[in-house]
Structures are given as C-alpha cells and as structure tokens.
Amino acid sequence: MFTDQSRPHVSPAPCRSPGPPLDVVEWRRCRLREAGFPAALARSLSRQRVDLHALLELVDAGCPPELAARILAPVDAEVDEPRAL
C-alpha cells in the first residue's frame, strides 16, 4: 500500500463520457480534479457559484489550487460594520 508521499502520480481520468454529457456539477468537479484540486475542494467548489474558468486560469499560471479558491471565494453579502484599520 502506498502512502500519500510515496504514491506514484496518477492523473485523474479525463472528463469525457461515452454517452450523453455529464451533469454540470460533475463536469465542474472533474475539470477541477484534472487541474490538480484536491477531491474535497473540487467537490465543494463544483457546487458553488465560483468562476470555473478563472480558477483554472489561476492554476495554469502557477497559483496553488487552495490559494486560487481563496482568491475567488465569494465575499459575504452581509457586512456588519466597517472595521477600523
């Protein structure tokens, strides 16, 4: 059995389906996994209203997936009070 550090690099299967197109959420999750996002993060982001293309562009430019997700995370609509700096 391999540990995470000794496991050989295995690329996720491409996002292709022999039949009808995949569900949109499943397709987004698959694209994020192909780009190197961890499974749990890809699953979470695939269900959110996050710009998938912007995420992929950041990762293609060398940004780690976790940081790309933080950069593009939706800002909360509610703001209590402006904070003093």
Image (spheres, helix red, strand yellow):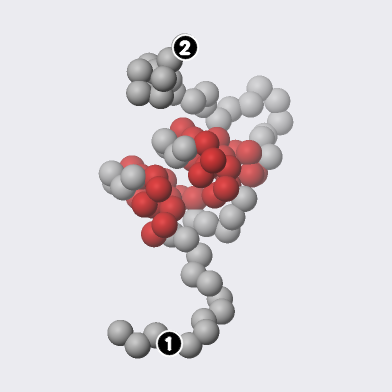
- Dot 1 alpha-carbon crowd within 10 angstroms: few under 14, some 14 to 19, many 20 or more: few
Residue at 43% across / 87% down in the picture? 82
Residue at 49% across / 50% down in the picture? 52
Disc 1: which residue: 82
In the image, which disc is placed on residue 48? none
Q: Position of residue 35 (x, y in %)?
A: 42, 37
Q: Is residue 20 visible?
A: yes
Pick the residue in front: 19 or 50. Answer: 50
In the image, which disc is placed on residue 1? 2
Q: Position of residue 22 (x, y in %)?
A: 66, 35
Q: Position of residue 84 (x, y in %)?
A: 35, 88
Would you identify the image quadrant in which residue 27 lies?
A: top right
Residue at 71% across / 31% down in the picture? 20
Quote the CA–CA distance across marks 2 and 1. Answer: 52 Å
Contact (CB < 8 A) between labels 2 and 1?
A: no
Type of amino acid at the residue the image marks with label 1: Pro
Q: Quadrant of the C terminus?
A: bottom left
Judging from the image, what secondary structure is the residue with disc 1 in?
Answer: loop
**Horizontal arrangement in the rendering, residue 9 relative to residue 61 (left or right):** right
